[in-house]
Image: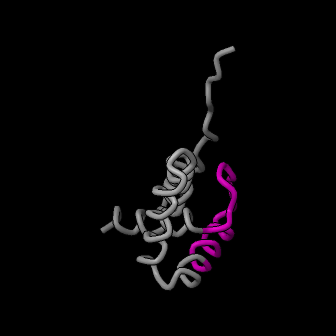
Amino acid sequence: MRSQLLSARAAALFASELPTGSRPALSVVGAAIASSVHACGGTRGCVAMMAAAYGDYPETSAPRMRWALSVASMMAPGATRPEPDRELIAA
């Protein structure tokens, strides 16, 4: 059950207008999830929007979903704020 809730929250965050890579406060995350679910007509609408994005923009969808899962996992009781993603760039 917990993984389904995490997946639904992540799909809603994916569909939200929050920028990828942001580390919003829990109140902002909750508001963004509620707004996305309402705008998309439910969690199934959020998942449909996510699927369309993967089809149209696969190169940006995977990083956005990793971000959405990271932020959604903060909503779990006792969760701690995750470290920002770090990327090694070779010169």
x and y, in percent, of residue 84 in the image: 64, 41
- Taking the magenta stretch, the answer to whether it contains residue 38 is no
Above or below, 72 against 48 in this view is above
Total of numbered circles in the picture?
0
Could you tell me which residue is drawn at 44 percent across and 71 percent down? 48
Q: Judge from the rendering whether residue 23 lies leftward or rightward of residue 8; answer left or right.
A: right
The answer to whether residue 47 shows anywhere in this view is yes
x and y, in percent, of residue 62 in the image: 50, 47
Residue 14 or 71: which is nearer the viewer? 14
x and y, in percent, of residue 10 in the image: 49, 62
Could you tell me which residue is drawn at 61 percent across and 38 percent down? 85
The answer to whether residue 70 shows anywhere in this view is no
- Can you tell which quarter of the image residue 32 is in? bottom right
Above or below, 33 against 86 in this view is below
x and y, in percent, of residue 65 in the image: 51, 53
- Part of the protein shown in magenta: 16-35
